[in-house]
Image (cartoon, rainbow, N blue to C red):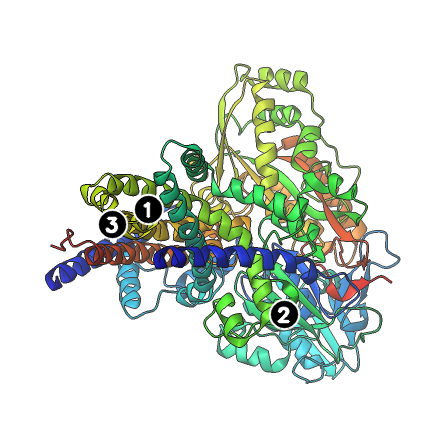
Amino acid sequence: MSRWVVRRLLTSLLTLFFITTITFALARVVPSNPAVVYIGPLARPAEIARVTKELGLDRPLYVQYVDYMRDLVHGNWGTSLATKQPVLGGIASRLPATLELILVAMAMAVAVGIPLGVLAAHRKGKAADTGARVGAVVGISMPVFWLGLLLQVLASQWLNILPPTSRQSLDVAVLHPVTKITGFLLVDALVTGDWSGLQDAATHILLPAITLAAYPAALVTRMTRAAMLDVLGQDYVRTARTFGLGERLVLWQLALRNAIPSTLTVVGLSLAYLLTGSFFVEIVFDWPGIGQYATNALLNLDYPAIMGITILGATAFLVINFVVDVLQARLDPRVRLQ
Amino acid sequence: MRSRRKLWIPAAAVAVALVAASAGWTSTTRTGGSTELLRVASTAQVTTWDPIKSFSTEVLYMANLYEPLVYANPPGSSTAFRPGLATSWSRTANGTTWTFHLRHGVTFHDGEPLTATAVKDSIEAAATRGAASFIWAALKSISTPDSYTVVITMKAPTRVDLIASSEDGAWIVCPAALAAEAKDAQYFESGKDCGTGPYMLKSYSAGKQVVLTAYSHYWGGWSGKRYSNVVVEITPEAIVQQQMLQSGQVDLALSVPLENINQLMKTGKYRLQVRQSTRNYVGFFNTTRPPLNDPLVRQALSYATPYRDIISVGAHGYGTQARGPVPRGIFPWSAATPQYTTNIAKAKALLEQSGHGDGFPMTLTYAAENQDEARYAPLIKDAYAKIGVTVTLKPILFNQQWALAKGDPKKAQDMFLLQYWPTYSDAGSDNLYSLFHSSAKPFFNLSYWKDPTYDKLVDTAAGITGSSAAKAKALYLKAMTILYDQAPGVYLYDMKTVLLTPKNLQVINATNINYPFVTFFYAVQQVG
C-alpha cells in the first residue's frame, strides 16, 4: 500500500511537471506580447519596452522557464498580467465560489441519480426505467450552457421565482455582507446565523447548481442502474430473497452497497469534470468562480493566470483519481492497490 | 432502511432549499426609492488602479474617483469646455502658455487641500511615467506662481484645454499617493485611490466587483437624490447584463445587446439615450505588397464595401457611415470629407483597370471577442466575392491579431479590422496621426502606408491647432481627402453610444462623447 502511494505520488508529480512545461511552452509560442497584455494595446513602444524589461520578458525563454518553476515550487504562481494581482491569490479568492457550486451540484446529482438508478434497475423495462433512461440521455446530451439558458428563461423570465445570475444580490453583498469565515457563502451564513444572507445565497445557487448537476446526475443514474442490475442478478441476492429478506432491505442495503463502488468512481470523475465543466455555467450565470477567472485569462492571453488554472485543474484530476482509487480499495475488498 | 433514509435526506434538503429559495427571491428584489446603493453592470475591467498609468477600461472608475482641470463638453454645447478643478483658464496669443486658476475649497480623499503644486506634480508624473504620456509630449515646463495658479508652457502652440480634459493621463492625484507611487510602482494596485472626485474606492475584487462610496467633502456637494454607494458588477457578457437589468438585479446595465434594444423598449420600462461616440471602425489594407499596394485596387474594395449592411448588422443601426478615420462630432471631422458609396459596377471597373479583373485571394483578421466585427466581417467577405476577391476570414484574439500585425508587414494580414478612439477629443493629432502617419516601425498604422504629402499636412496642422484651429482643420481636410483618394483603409462606420436606463433613473449628462468609456455616477439621480 505505502509503495503504491509513493509510486502514485511520484507519477503525479512527474505528470504535473510535464503539464506545466507543455503549458508554459504553448502559452509562450502563441503570437501575443505579454507586455502589451500587461500595459494595454494602446501603450506606446517605449512603454512596452519598459514593461518588457520590468517583467523580465527580454530574457531567454529557458531562463524565464527556470525562474517560473523555481517560484512555483516556492508557492509563487506569478502575477496576473491582466489584474496585476498574484495568481495564487486570484485563484484562492475564487475557488470557494466554484467549490461551493460544485459541491451543491454534486449533492444534487447524487441525491437524484442514485435513487433514480436503483428505481430504474428495480423496475427494469417498465415506465419508471424508461423515464430514468430517457432522462439520463437528455442530461448527458444537453449542453450545459443551453440548459442554463433554458432554466434562466423558465425560472427567471417566465416564472420570476429565481434570480438569473450572480452569487448573491448586490444589496446583500455591499450593504449587508455575509461575514466571511470559510468563503463558502452558504456555510458562512449558516454558521453566523445570517438567515437573510443564507436565503439570498441559496436562491442564487439553485439555477447554476441544477444546470451543473444535470450531467453527473445522468451519469450516476446510468451507472447505478447498470451496477444494480448486475448485482441483482447475483446468486447471493437470489439467496437473500429466497430466505425471505424484504425487498427494500435487499435493494437498498444489500444490493446498493455492492453496487456503490462503481458509482463512486463516476462520482469521483464527475467531480473533476465539474471543476472544468463549471466554466460554461459560470459564464452563463455570471458566477464569480475560477471559470470566469480562466475565461478572462484565456481571452487576455494572460499566461501566468492560464498556467495557474492549468496547474490547479491538473492537480484536481490527479488528487481526485488518487482518492477514488483508495476509496474503492476500502469499499471493495476485491480491489487491491498494487 | 437506515441507508434509504440517509439517501433521502439530501434529496429532501434540496427540495426544501428550492422551495425556500424560490419563496424568498421576490422579497429580495428591490422596488426602488433608496439612494443608498446604485447597482451597475459593466464590462469595464481594471488593468490598473494607478491613475498615472491608467490607459484602459478602468477609466470608468477613474473618472468617478479623480478629476481633470477641465471637462470637454459634447458638441452643440454653449461652451466647448466646462470647469473641472480649474474654474477659469486663458492662453497667450501664440497658444504656447496656458494659465489655469484652481477651484478653492477642494480636498483630496486623504483630506489634503488641492494646490497648484499637486497639479504640477500630477501632470509631470503623467508626462514622464504615464501610459498616455505622449499627450504631454509638447510640455516644456509648469510653474506655480501661487497656490491656486498653474502656468503650463508648451514647446509649440497646443490645445492644452483639450489635453487637460483627456480621459487618460490628465487626472489630478494627491501628493502623498504620488510620492508613494514614485517609490513603489505597485502602490495603487491593491485598490487604493486618492483623487478629488465625488466617489472613493471602497473595495475591489479583481475581475468581479468594484464598490465606490461617496466622498462626503466633495466640493460639488450631495444635494438631490444622488447615490451614496455604487457597486459595479464586472459582467463581460452583454446578454447577462440584460438579464440582470430585466430581473431587477441591477439598476443600470452599461452594455445591453444592441439587437435586443427594441424588444426591451417595448416593455415601456426604459428610456433610450443614443449619442454619437468617438469610436469608429477602420479596415486597414496592407499596402506593402501586390495587389493591395495599388490604389486602384484599394479604391475598388472601398466601392465594394457594403456600408449600409455593415451598419445594419454590425451596429444594429446604431452607427453612421464614417467619413475617414475621424469620428463624427469631434475635431477635425468635416462633412466636406468625401466618402465612398457601395457601387459594385464601379468596383469591378476599377479592378479591371488595375489589371486584377480576375480577382485575388486575401486574408482578413479581426478580433474574435469583438461581437460587432464578428457580425459584419462575413458581409465584407460576401461583398468582395462579388468582384472576384476571395476573402479568408481569420477571427483571432485581439492580442494575437495585434501581435501578428506588428510583425513583418510583408507576412502580415491583407486586411485588419480595428475599432479605434482618440485618447482625447482631437482626432487630428490622434486618429489621423496614429492611424496613417508614416513611421519607421508600424504602431497603429497597420496599412503600413507612407505618403510624405499626407505626413506634412498632418504635422503642420498639429503644430498650429493650438493657435489656429480653423486653419488646422482646413489642412486636416486636405489630409483626409488624400486618405479618400489613396484608400489605405476602408472607413466603415462611426459608432453610437447606446444607454438604456430604467425610467426611475435620471442620467442626464452622465455620458459624454468625449469620455466614451465613462458614466459619471454623480450625475445619476433617482426620479421622484
Give the number of the mark in front: 3 or 1: 1
> Spatial distance from mark 2 to mark 1, Cα to Cα?
54 Å
Q: Is residue B93 above or below residue A264?
A: below
Instruction: Decide if residue A245 is on the left or right side of residue B4.
Output: left
Q: Secondary structure at mark 2?
A: helix
The quarter in which the N terminus of chain A is drawn is: bottom left
Q: Nearer the viewer, residue A148 or B106?
A: A148
Q: Which residue is mark 2?
A: A174
> Pointer 3: residues within 10 angstroms few (<14), some, or many (20+)?
some
Q: With respect to residue B203, does B262 lie above or below?
A: above
Mark sitting earlier along the chain (2/1):
2
Residue of label 1: A247
Q: Nearer the viewer, residue A142 or A135?
A: A135
Q: Nearer the viewer, residue B249 or A196?
A: A196
Dot 1: what SS? helix
**The residue marked by circle 3 belongs to what chain?**
A
What is the three-letter code of the residue carrying label 1? Glu
Please give the residue where the numbered disc 3 appears in the rendered image: A258
